[in-house]
Image (cartoon, grey):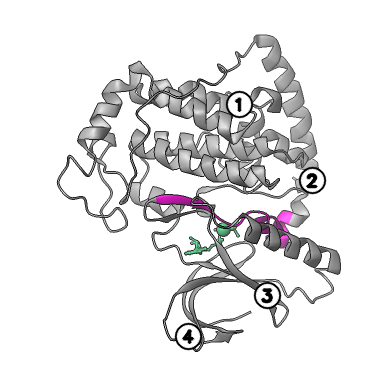
Amino acid sequence: MALKAGDEIGQYVLQARLGSGGFGSVWKAIRKGSLIEIPVAVKVSHEDLSSEEVGDRAVEQLLAEARAWVSASGHRNVVPVQDAGIWDGHLLLVSELMTEGSLRTHLNRVGAQPMPAVEAVRLTLGVLAGLEHLHGLGIVHRDLKPENILLQKGDPRITDFGIARFATRSTQTRGYSGTLQYMSPDAFENRVSLQMDLWAVGVMLFEMLAGFRPFDGANEAQLIRAILIDPVPTLPGEATAVLQPVVQRALEREVSRRFTSAEQFRRALEVAWLAPANSALRAAARSKSPAAAPPATPTATSAPAAGMGNQRPLAGTPPLPDAPVQAAAPPAKNSPAKWRTLLVLGAASLGTVFWVTGL
Ligand SMILES: Nc1ncnc2c1ncn2[C@@H]1O[C@H](COP(=O)(O)OP(=O)(O)OP(=O)(O)O)[C@@H](O)[C@H]1O
Ligand SMILES: [Mg+2]
């Protein structure tokens, strides 16, 4: 559907296109006739839901996901949905406008270099708090990625859960849904569990701390191989060594060895961050904090900084906890036998994936 600024969709007047993803395009809009202009984000599905191709069952499922999202709204780390409806066959989802872009835009600004660890930890703790809320409601996101973490007043807020699975014909013909780079090995088998979300958070935490993703490849087949078979890389740099066990446990290929809940992951991250070995890093973060440093230009407008120590946290950064919290279980060890099993399982899964992808 070709939309342009000025178009009226239901009771919303479109102002500017914010972007487009697999499911729909997103517009900054205002409510028609409103005396106070409060901008909102309106997502309009690409698909005409009334078409035969989509089918009644998919529409019902989609509306159920939209209702679940509405029920999850109200948490500080979840983007609140304000309205949902069907317009000319297309699903409209109206949510609060997040003004600081997505974690992806923030990562792009930082460039291919590590984000300050204090900021990576703080953002991850926020995402995990939002996930705890979603999982508590029985909602598994299934497509967590930096594009679906939006920023508002420095807080990370999760968006697009459930809905993202309805994205594009390509994901449907692939036989599984999700964004490859952030998909867990179990997600390739369409096994849905909250641990698939925890894996995705592990990938994002790695990416923030390292400046690159743990799994990559020149093509889809290589990327899938990296996720299923290749050794999981370790975090570069001494500063992040203390966080390595946490990342490693989030990226356990076997679901039973991964964190069992977002809360367990969050506590382990807090404990690791507060570890004595990390005190120098914390002190460096404190000396760079807005309270100690000259007033910081909000990250949204600042140029990419050169290296960990030179970067400042996002505007509105709340302090990290400075008192120890209950320790989580230590990460599981990898035995050679486990790697052999994984290799076999990985190879088998790879065969399945190639089959569904038609590679
Ligand atoms: N509530 C919102 N406030 C501000 N910007 C938003 C909001 N929701 C989405 N956006 C922006 O709109 C753009 C498109 O988002 P969209 O969710 O359609 O794509 P995506 O996340 O890349 O892919 P996917 O369809 O898999 O979720 C992104 O740049 C996103 O940051
Ligand atoms: Mg999205």
Q: Could you tell me the amino acid type at mark 2? A: Val
- Point out which mark residue 85 bears: 3
- Point out which mark residue 308 bears: none
Q: Which of marks 3 and 4 is nearer the N terminus?
A: 4
Residue at the spot x=76%, y=25% of the render? 345
Q: Earlier in the sequence, mark 2 or mark 4?
A: 4
Q: Is label 2 in a helix, a strand or a loop?
A: helix
Q: Which of marks 3 and 2 is nearer the N terminus?
A: 3
Count neighbours of disc 4 (C-alpha within 10 A) and say few if under 14, some if 14 to 19, many if 20 or more.
Answer: few
Residue at the spot x=17%, y=39% of the render? 292
Q: Which of marks 2 and 1 is nearer the N terminus?
A: 1
Q: Could you tell me the amino acid type at mark 4? A: Ser
Residue at the spot x=44%, y=23% of the render? 271
The residue under label 4 is 34
> Which one is closest to the eye, mark 1 or mark 4?
4
Labels 3 and 2 touching (C-beta < 8 A) = no
Query: Residue 217, image x and y in percent?
Result: 56, 39
Labels 2 and 4 touching (C-beta < 8 A) = no
- Point out which mark residue 230 bears: 1
The residue under label 2 is 356
User: Which quadrant of the view contains residue 356?
Assistant: top right
